[in-house]
Image: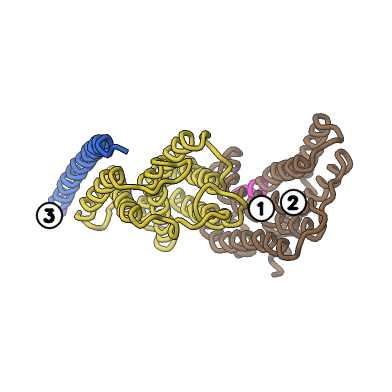
Chain colours: A brown, B blue, C yellow
Amino acid sequence: MKEVNELILKDFRLEIRQRYAINGILLYVFSTIFVVQLCFGRIIDEKTWIALFWIILLFAAFNAVSKSFNQESSSRRLYYFTLASPLSVIISKMVYNTLLMLILGILSLGLFSVFMGMPPLYPWLFIPAFLLGSAGLASALTMVSAIASRSGNNAALMAILGFPIVLPLLLLLVKASQTSLKEVVEAGVILRLLSAIGLIDLVIVVLAVILFPYLWRD
Amino acid sequence: MESDKFFVVAIVMAIIFTGLAVYLFLLDRKLSRIEKKQSEMMEELKRKEQE
Amino acid sequence: MWWKFLGVFLVLYSIIAGLLIDVPALPVIHQTIRNLFYHVPMWFSMFFMLGTSLVFSVRYLSGFRMKDDLIASGAANTGLVMGSLGLLTGMIWARFTWGDFWTNDPQLNGAAVSMMAYLAYVVLRGSIDESAMRARISAVYNIFAFMLLVIFLGVLPRLADSSLHPGKGGNTSTMEGLDPLMRMVFYPAAIGWILIAFWLLQLHNRRRALVQGVKLNNQ
């Protein structure tokens, strides 16, 4: 447990030092939202709002998470291997990326509402869905980044591998967001959607934890 | 529905499929021959090494 | 060996019987319902192939034998072929029956995305040169891809609202609604095509084993 915390702190410190990565992502988010605002103006159909929100968040996530496994050179990676168990490594990366995604998400949400207004979203559905969804997307993309990093670090490869894996989660998130546009949502519907998202999250995390050691050894 | 017309289509498709199946079968047989030859060559090599 | 002949026989039977038996008169679809005997077995075969690919990917990860990797990748390739045939025949059927090549059916979209995942698997394999690492990394991705397949074809369609396919989104399930006479042709057709798919897989594997110098079991 302590190992995991240490690793998360390490990633965090690295990020603060090499600020170009996080700056790039922030710039990306800001500029895309600004361009969207230029095209659509303030009057934007609610469904479009949701679609755009998740698309921009998704691409920012791809950008952010693909850097997870690239920052360290392979000699340093061998050093980590001798120190930390692969379980700690993967969990720390997933937690770190989840936090990153949450920050990105809240930021995007803020920018969206500033530029294009905020549609009435039923908070009891939207907020848990957003939290669970960010965790799921982050974990899935972390795993894909791990796979892509062992095969040449091609940016296109990350997108090719990642897109299908991310899609079911994305579909559910969009559906949950659309459902939360209604005034009141019954508890049954909320439960069904959230448990579906939660289930996919669980499957992704479990598979990632089991399979990551196979990727990690050199 | 005139089932005569269907009959014709059925025969045509059956012929096409049988042709493909025969092709697959010949391919299968060719592979078996190559595999057999390969294992015979391996046996030869093993015997020569033991001498 | 015998099962190959059985496969050929069953498919031949389904071709002839499928065109000659009487089918229930359904609105819109009319006689094209006979496509059930040919289009659907493609998907079944794909599923069996990809399942085989999963099994051998897991086997590779537990024993690191190259033979398992060979079969896993061969099965994925064959599965993609069957899936493409299923997709193509489905699109043509849809165009002539319902007017469009593509509809917003969740099972259709799901099948397409699942196949994309396996295409990504092929791309991944192409990008790693060293054979042991390639086997290991692609085996890991294969497991995720199969998970996707299960989610897309099994879980999501049941949650969806409306669908073109039987059993999902409010339609009655295929198995209950299938005319008994059609059933007599459909089951043999499905089994026959699955056997043919395994035959194709076997040929594919044997050829590549010869080329790569890998030993398959039954020699």
Q: Which mark is residue A172?
A: 1
Give the image location of residue C35, x and y in percent.
38, 43
* Tag 3: amino acid: Arg
Say above or below: A132 vs C206. below
> Helix, strand, or loop for circle 3?
helix
User: What are the residue bounds of the magenta stretch?
Assistant: A67-75
Mark nearest the camera among 3 and 2 is 2
> Helix, strand, or loop for circle 2?
helix
Q: Are marks 3 and 2 in contact (CB under 8 Å)?
A: no
Looking at the rendered structure, whether the residues under marks 1 and 2 are on a common chain is answered as yes
Q: Is residue C110 magenta?
A: no
> Helix, strand, or loop for circle 1?
helix
Residue drawn where x is 56% and y is 45% of the image:
C105
The residue to which callout 3 is attached is B47
Q: Is residue A71 magenta?
A: yes
Looking at the rendered structure, whether the residues under marks 3 and 2 are on a common chain is answered as no
Determine crowd level at label 3: few under 14, some 14-19, many 20+ residues with C-alpha closer than 10 A.
few
In the rendered structure, the answer to whether residue A102 lies left or right of residue C34 reads: right
Main SS category, magenta section = loop
